[in-house]
């Protein structure tokens, strides 16, 4: 047996495994004999069937298995021993034609897609922008207004607004607008226009007083949401979806949100019980800092986009074995019984991602980027903080965040995402140390336009 390699061009190669029958004949004979013991032919005791008969029945399949294993091992041993960095997997060359049962000498040829060499060293002459989002007074005002509503209390009100919670009674009407005999009647149900899907129906509950009576359509108001209708009308879910009648509602109670006062209790509710902030000026600066901190993930994400663009450009023209890769993808799809057609747009998108991955792997190796357990734990903690903040839980105690992080790490999908974040965090932190980072503060509108420009 002999293995040889021919480099076709910079990114394509041909690997040939030459076999003689004598290289695999003994293994085939042994396995065919073993098959005769494990699976005796009809009319023969185990191991007693003639060799020629066993070869007739089992020879072709056993020979194919033995040769496949032998060729595969030889091929991958050669790739490993000669440090050939390939993309995808070797594919059988179309000129490979062998007769396993009759040829004495065989040549198995495989096309290889070779990974291009990346010549890039990071230094301070490479400039990558980093955009900080300006925190304006208006952003601080809006955040404080939101928190004053969030931490406010419900009090009796004379006139409702869209944020009000109302209580009232409801009676189902017939097609003529009269009380429906045997219709649905609800006492003391809770209604909040802010959760309605239909703006016209929600508007009927704004600007009303206690004692107001009017007609509205629950099914239209909640867009047929069975859960909402079931709770509102106090009926079974199986019935709620079919209730499309108008209802007369009488408002009996109005609760409006009274915004929280700007005092130390409010400051602690926003900043955490351990805060030492005691006046509005200090509170505003603390809120400004919170907003800036909340913007960091977006700013970091923008940095990854710009770093990818700059570093890929610095790496120059990265040649890929494009035709080989298309064929490789098609082969994989055929194995998965998926559509094999690859559009040019799809292929170019894949090649763009692959070029960046090659550059990224090269840089990670050059900078010695290694992810430790501590990095993953930190990423899980940050991920848990972000998830809690989405539910309005800010400044959560460290123990609570750690418990939540541990729960996420128990979920396969979340754990995989967190590990990817940890890798990216370590990689881009190393990049920021190695290149010159040009920091610039821009408005949130300018920041959004960066992404609009990318889309164009």
Image: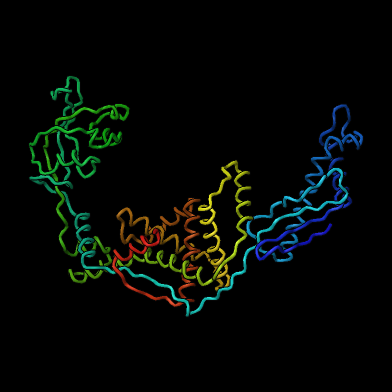
Residue 327 appears left or right of 418: right
Q: Is residue 437 above or below residue 28?
A: below
- 404 or 390: nearer the viewer: 390
Residue 448 appears left or right of 162: right
Q: Is residue 286 above or below residue 331?
A: below
Residue pictured at 89% horizontal, 34% vertical:
53
Give the x, y percent position of residue 109: 76, 54
Residue pictured at 8% horizontal, 39% vertical:
210
Residue pictured at 50% horizontal, 78% vertical:
123
Q: Identify the image quadrant of the C terminus.
A: bottom left
**Residue 192 visible at all:** no
Give the x, y percent position of residue 126: 47, 77
Residue 346 appears left or right of 385: right
**Residue at the outermost top position:** 181
Residue pictured at 25% horizontal, 69% vertical:
286
Give the x, y percent position of residue 426: 49, 68
Q: Is residue 212 above or below residue 13?
A: above
- 259 or 351: nearer the viewer: 351
Residue 99 appears left or right of 172: right
């Amino acid at each position: 047996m002999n293995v040889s390699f021919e480099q076709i061009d910079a990114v394509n190669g041909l690997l040939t495994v030459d076999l003689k029958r004598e290289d695999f004949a003994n293994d085939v004979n042994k396995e065919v004999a073993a098959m005769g013991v494990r699976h005796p032919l009809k009319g023969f005791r185990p191991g007693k069937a003639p060799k020629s008969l066993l070869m007739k029945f089992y020879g072709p399949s056993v020979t194919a298995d033995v040769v496949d294993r032998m060729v595969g091992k030889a091929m991958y041993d050669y790739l490993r021993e000669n440090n050939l960095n390939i993309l995808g997997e070797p594919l059988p060359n179309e000129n490979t034609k062998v007769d396993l049962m009759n040829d004495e000498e065989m040549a198995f040829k495989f096309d290889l897609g070779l990974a291009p060499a990346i010549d890039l060293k990071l230094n301070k002459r490479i400039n990558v922008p980093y955009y900080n989002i300006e925190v304006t007074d208006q952003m601080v005002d809006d955040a404080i207004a939101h928190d004053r509503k969030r931490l406010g209390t419900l009090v009796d009100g004379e006139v409702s607004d869209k944020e009000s919670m109302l209580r009232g009674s409801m009676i189902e009407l017939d097609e003529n607008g009269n009380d429906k005999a045997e219709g649905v009647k609800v006492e003391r149900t809770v209604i909040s226009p802010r959760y309605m899907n239909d703006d016209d129906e929600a508007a009927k509950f704004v600007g009303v007083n206690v004692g107001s009576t009017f007609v509205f359509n629950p099914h239209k108001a909640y867009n047929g949401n069975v859960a909402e209708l079931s709770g509102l009308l106090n009926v079974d879910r199986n019935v709620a979806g079919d209730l499309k009648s108008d209802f007369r509602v009488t408002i009996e109670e109005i609760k409006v949100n009274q915004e929280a006062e700007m005092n130390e209790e409010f400051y602690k509710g926003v900043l955490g019980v351990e805060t030492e902030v005691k006046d509005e000026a200090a509170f505003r600066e603390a809120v400004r800092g919170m907003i800036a901190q909340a913007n960091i993930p977006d700013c970091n994400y923008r940095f990854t986009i710009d770093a990818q663009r700059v570093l890929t450009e610095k790496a120059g023209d990265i040649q890929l074995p494009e035709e080989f890769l298309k064929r490789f993808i098609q082969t994989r799809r055929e194995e998965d019984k998926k559509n094999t057609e690859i559009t040019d747009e799809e292929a170019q998108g894949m090649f763009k991602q692959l070029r960046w991955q090659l550059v990224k792997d090269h840089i990670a190796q050059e900078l010695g980027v290694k992810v430790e357990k501590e990095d993953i734990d930190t990423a899980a903690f940050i991920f848990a903080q972000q998830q809690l903040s989405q539910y309005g839980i800010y400044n959560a105690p460290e123990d609570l965040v750690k418990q939540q992080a541990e729960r996420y790490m128990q979920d396969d999908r979340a754990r995989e995402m967190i590990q990817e974040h940890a890798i990216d965090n370590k990689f881009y932190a190393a990049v920021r140390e190695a290149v010159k980072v040009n920091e610039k503060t821009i408005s949130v509108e300018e920041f959004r336009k960066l992404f609009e420009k990318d889309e164009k």
